[in-house]
Image (tube, rainbow, N blue to C red):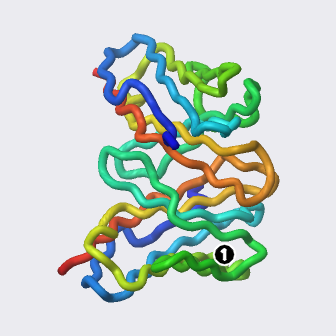
Amino acid sequence: DAGVTQSPTHLIKTRGQHVTLRCSPISGHKSVSWYQQVLGQGPQFIFQYYEKEERGRGNFPDRFSARQFPNYSSELNVNALLLGDSALYLCASSPRTSGRSDTQYFGPGTRLTVL
Amino acid sequence: DQQVKQNSPSLSVQEGRISILNCDYTNSMFDYFLWYKKYPAEGPTFLISISSIKDKNEDGRFTVFLNKSAKHLSLHIVPSQPGDSAVYFCAAQPTGTASKLTFGTGTRLQVTL
């Protein structure tokens, strides 16, 4: 079975531009979460979506938004890009949104560079 | 405020010996803990997890120990292999949610020949 897939792999943008990152979860998984990882740090939680609804949000500005589609795939959008948005953006999927022992599985990530 | 801490940025271990990676947390609401392994330019790969109702979980060469009173967990790898060389992240999940993992800053493990 295919794992979590993300596109594109790499992306270079300039300050002020907008970017859309895409994620397809593992088949059968209904929950998708987004994380940002900057160099030297652990991933930081941005959003969680389940059944097309936002179920959790991390400490990120409103420039960050996301949505989930009926097929459970997801997009992360970032507006008005700043140099500090340069990071590896990770998508993770899990079967459900609540309960114990629900492991998240990560995709390979999208490397975003803002110049 | 770093709620999950991995105080050792790096660790070097000889092949065949035991690797012990440590993690401390401060939030009492965390009740599910995971270890992920990450190679450069790849996403984190799930290794092993433990629920707060247990104090030990084993999977092959990997064992995770949880000491709730000390808010401490550790990952033991025995025997260590060169392919284990990677960055290891400890992550914690709060009660009632299956997402919103809080990660530590990682420990880079190098297994030498």
- Work out whether A76 lies above or below B10: above
Q: Quadrant of the N terminus of chain B?
A: bottom right
Residue A59 seen in render: no
Q: Residue at x 40, y 42 (%)?
A: A38
Q: Residue at x 51, y 64 (%)?
A: B47
Where residue B89 sits in the image (x, y, percent)?
A: 47, 61
Which amino acid is tagged 1? Lys
Residue A99 seen in render: yes
Q: Secondary structure at mark 1?
A: loop
Q: Quadrant of residue A34?
A: top right
Q: Quadrant of the C terminus of chain B?
A: bottom left
Where residue B39 sits in the image (x, y, percent)?
A: 33, 54
Q: Is residue A1 left or right of residue B111?
A: right
Q: Is residue A25 left or right of residue A30?
A: left
Q: Quadrant of residue B25?
A: bottom right
Q: Is residue A68 left or right of residue A79?
A: right
Question: Looking at this view, is B26 or A70 the one in front?
Answer: A70
- Work out whether B51 lies above or below B65: above
- Work out whether A48 lies above or below B50: above
Q: Residue at x 66, y 20 (%)?
A: A69
Tag 1 subunit? B
Where residue B105 sits in the image (x, y, percent)?
A: 45, 58
Q: Residue at x 33, y 23 (%)?
A: A11
User: Furthest residue to the left?
Assistant: B113
Question: Looking at this view, is A25 or A55 the one in front?
Answer: A25
User: Furthest residue to the front?
Assistant: A1
- Work out whether A44 lies above or below B5: above
What residue sits right under mark 1 in the picture? Answer: B71
Give the crowd class for mark 1: few <14, some 14-19, many >=20 residues within 10 Å: some
Where residue B90 sits in the image (x, y, percent)?
A: 53, 63
